[in-house]
Amino acid sequence: MKIKAITIILLTLLFMNGKAQENFELIVLGSGGGTDDGNLSGYLLSASDSDKYLCLDAGTLMHGLILATKAGHFNHLEKDTNTEELPAHVLHHHIDAYAISHTHLDHITGMLIAAPFDNEKKIFCSPKTADELMNYIFLSPLWANFTTEGKGAIGKWELKRMENKNWYKVPNNQLQIKSFDLCHSCPNTSSAFLVKNNNSYALYFGDTGADIIEGENKLNEIFNEIAPLIKKEELKAIFIEVSFPDSQKDQHLYGHLKPSLLESELEKLAAKVNSKEIDNALYGVKLFITHLKPNYSIENNSLPIITEEIMKMKHYGAEIIFPKQSEKHTF
């Protein structure tokens, strides 16, 4: 009986420990880097014990919600009292904010197309991104002004201009978020977002070039911020783009990464975490590789080439994941 009791206790502790490690839930609305307009950057992130989501970029939105619904990821939200189909119910009642890294169309189109059907939300972004959204979209002939500011404001979306490295609370949500500037073919910019759930973190990069290509120090500054979190095993995941294979010439990267440049940047991060055991310094971090760009070549299809090159490079202990549309991940 004692052995049985001890076994039950150990199994319970293992189960509790496993659950404790699942701090976030991720639903992939879209993960592609372009051309396929039904699969563009869009990720729902929530605390693992919550049904309230933050939408990280929204190149694909309703189409992604429909596919995620078909995959069963929102079954727990299906109620007899729902007055809308489930994808619309999720949009209106379980997504209270967007975090938009920059204004390129593959990161905002889904949000814009859904705007007439959407409800009140905050849009977290940099001041530059907010100004670009206002000047080139909402105050232009391209689209109606769905924001709460400026001429003809419809009043649905409040632009929350984020000051770098300040924490902001996501509405109706236990998550907090702060932003960092990125170079996306400087002087063009993008943003990275660090999301916090209690003492656990996830880092999402919008489009970014490598420091050595951009002539800036943006990634290194972010690595200085997150290295202590990795040391304390608090940073659970990093989402970072790799748009092209290594055959792409540096002058034609247009503010994106390729596998060799990602490896160089990971080496810098790993050295900050543990310079004495650099090869395994990122152990425990899930590294989601996003924004792969298809080229539709029969002989040299870029997607498997990028994947193969990433798997061959040094990972410094990180777990490599290629997120696919409509998948769910916990970490």
Image (tube, grey):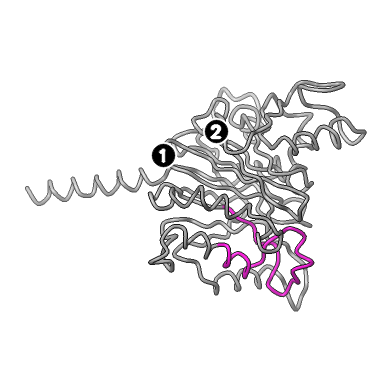
Residue that label 2 marks: 167
* C-alpha distance separating marks 2 and 1: 14 Å
User: Relative to 150, does residue 113 appear above or below in the rendering?
Assistant: below
- Which label number is shown at residue 171? none
Say which element carries label 2. loop
Residue 148, by quadrant, is: top right
Say which element carries label 1. loop
Single out the residue that lies furthest toward the left.
1
How far across and how far down the image is residue 246, in percent? 68, 73
Residue 283, by quadrant, is: bottom left
The magenta segment is 239-265
Residue that label 1 marks: 199
- How many numbered tags mark residues here? 2
The magenta stretch spans residue 300 = no
Q: Residue at x 67, y 29 (%)?
A: 160
How far across and how far down the image is residue 299, in percent? 75, 78
Q: Which three-letter amino acid code belongs to the residue tagged 1?
A: Asn
**Do the numbered discs 2 and 1 sit on residues whose CB atoms are within 8 Å?**
no
How far across and how far down the image is residue 80, in percent? 55, 25
